[in-house]
Structures are given as structure tokens and as C-alpha cells.
Image: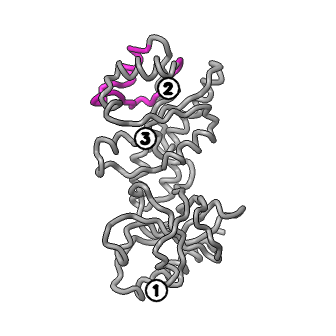
Amino acid sequence: MTIGNFDGVHRGHQAMLARLTEAALDLRLPSAVLTFDPHPREFFAKGKAPPRLSRLRQKLEVFRAFGIARTIVARFDEQLAAMTPEAFIDDVLVRRLDARWVLVGDDFRFGRARAGNLAVLRAHAKSFSVEGMGTVAVDTQRASSTAVREALAAGNLVRAGALLGRPYTIGGRVAHGQKLGRSLGFPTANIPLKHPPPLTGIFAVRVHGLGVVPCTGVASIGVRPTIEHDGQPRLEVFLFDFDESIYGRRVTVEFVHKLREEEKYETLDALTRQIRADVVQARDYFARVA
């Protein structure tokens, strides 16, 4: 078993999953991941928690891709937050999960007030072995969820992709929107965001899930300051050369290249002109990289 939040499932997490599956094979035990929802920082910080890099569904998909046999999603609530490290070990790892071999990162913290660490886990592990995972670096930078967030917030998709080991994506089902894009001549697929996104702006994107070949397009992710005043983030995608009804379809939006920051325009005409320019710029980008 390995334990953690695995937000983004970056290359450091992937190294842990690879080590886990290797050990499970050697020990002839099923591999398992224990993760938490919501993220503990969301529980404690409420609206001040850092943005999630991945939805729970996306994490589960990556775990399956790595061949993890079992994923346990623990509800992070007041009861779990109040557990001492010793109680977590005895009640969760031993009594409920019957763990035999546990892998954690060298910065792992657990239990009330984050009092537990790798040394505490080892000291109280009577019925299971403990292994610590060292830091995984990408071009001398430690692979971490924080580093990925910083790269995305700066619009550095290349750096974020290097830390993640894959392009950054957001998945979800296409929902009905206000149909404003259609009235402007740019109908969009709207993907609801359950949590604040780690990046904002206008992007050239590829959309997976609508056919054998990904569709290209332009995505706006942000609060739409020209249209809205509620400050709720939205993800909208205009697909190039595409005219099908896809409401309810599950898609994955791959962020390829940042075009610009989100801006507020005085009129809808000014916004329309900028969207038209964004489309031209994105098409040129995809033509260059084809």
C-alpha cells in the first residue's frame, strides 16, 4: 500500500506507483492506494486551499493505468482529522486495511496536527514493513504538486508537462451553457468546473473523446469578466471545423499552448473581434506544430 493525496499524479507520484506495483509483485500481495477526498487542505482551509490539479475520477484512471489493484478513498472529515498518528496506524492501516507493506514519501505527514511522519510510522509498525520514497527531480527541480501549480499559474505548459510526465488536462461532461458563444458566431462546449482551476487564460487546446483523432480548438478558462460578475470560473471550448451536438459527452481538454491572459472588453463586438483573432492565432499554432 501507498498513502497520499496524489494531486495531479505527477512524476514523483508515478515513481511511487511503479515501486508499489514492483513490491506487490515481489511480495505476492495486491497493490493498493489509500487517498483522501476532499484534499485535507480543502478541509482545513475551506476557500483558501490551493486549486486541485486533478479530479478524483482522473486520479482513479491513472491508478488503473498503473495496474493498481485496489484504491481506497477515505472521506477526510473531522473524525479522520482528529485521529492521532498512532490511532491512524492501529485503526486504519492495521485493523481495517491489514496492510503488510507501506510506501510513503520522505515528506509524508499524517495524523492530528500533522504530528506523524516517516519516523513515527516506522516506530509503530509492528505488523507491516515501511519504505520511504526519496525525492524525484525533473531538471533539478523537485517534482511536486506545488511546482506543477506554479508552472500552470505562470502559463508554462511545457514545464508543467515535464513535471507531470504528460500534458495538463481537465476532463468532464459537456453541459448546456448560456449559448452566448453561438450568438457571437463561436459556439462553445461548456465543461463545468467543480473546483477553482490552477490556470486561467486563453489556450490552444486538443479535445479528446469525440473521435479517433483529437479535435483542435481554443479554450477560455476563467471568470469571463466581459460577461459575468459572479466570479465563478468556467471552461469553454470552441472546436475548429466541428458541428455536432455533444451535450452529455465526456471529454478531456488538453492544454497545449497559452495564447494570452483573460481580459475584460467594453463591448461584445470588441470581445468577438478578439475571439476571432484568438482562433486565427491558434490555427496558426497548430499548423506550425503539425
Secondary-structure class at tag 1: helix
**Residue at point 59%, 33% (across, down):** 18
Residue 202 position, x and y percent, is 46, 70
Kind of residue sitting beneath label 2 = Leu
Residue 116 position, x and y percent, is 34, 24
Secondary-structure class at tag 2: strand
**Residue at point 46%, 75% (across, down):** 178
Residue at mark 1 to residue at mark 2: CA–CA distance = 54 Å
Comes first in the chain, label 3 or label 1: 3
The magenta region covers: 100-125
Q: Residues within 10 Å of mark 2 (few under 14, many from 20)?
A: many
Secondary-structure class at tag 3: strand
Q: Residue furthest right?
A: 212
Residue at mark 3 to residue at mark 2: CA–CA distance = 20 Å
Q: Residues within 10 Å of mark 1 (few under 14, many from 20)?
A: few
Kind of residue sitting beneath label 3 = Asp
Give the labeled residue for mark 2.
103
**Residue at point 57%, 58% (across, down):** 252
Give the labeled residue for mark 3.
37
Give the labeled residue for mark 1.
273
Are the residues flagged by discs 3 and 1 in contact, CB closer than 8 Å? no
Kind of residue sitting beneath label 1 = Arg
- Classify residue 230 as left or right of residue 23: left
**Mark toward the viewer: 3 or 1:** 3
Task: Give the answer, above or below, for where 211 lies relative to 117.
Answer: below
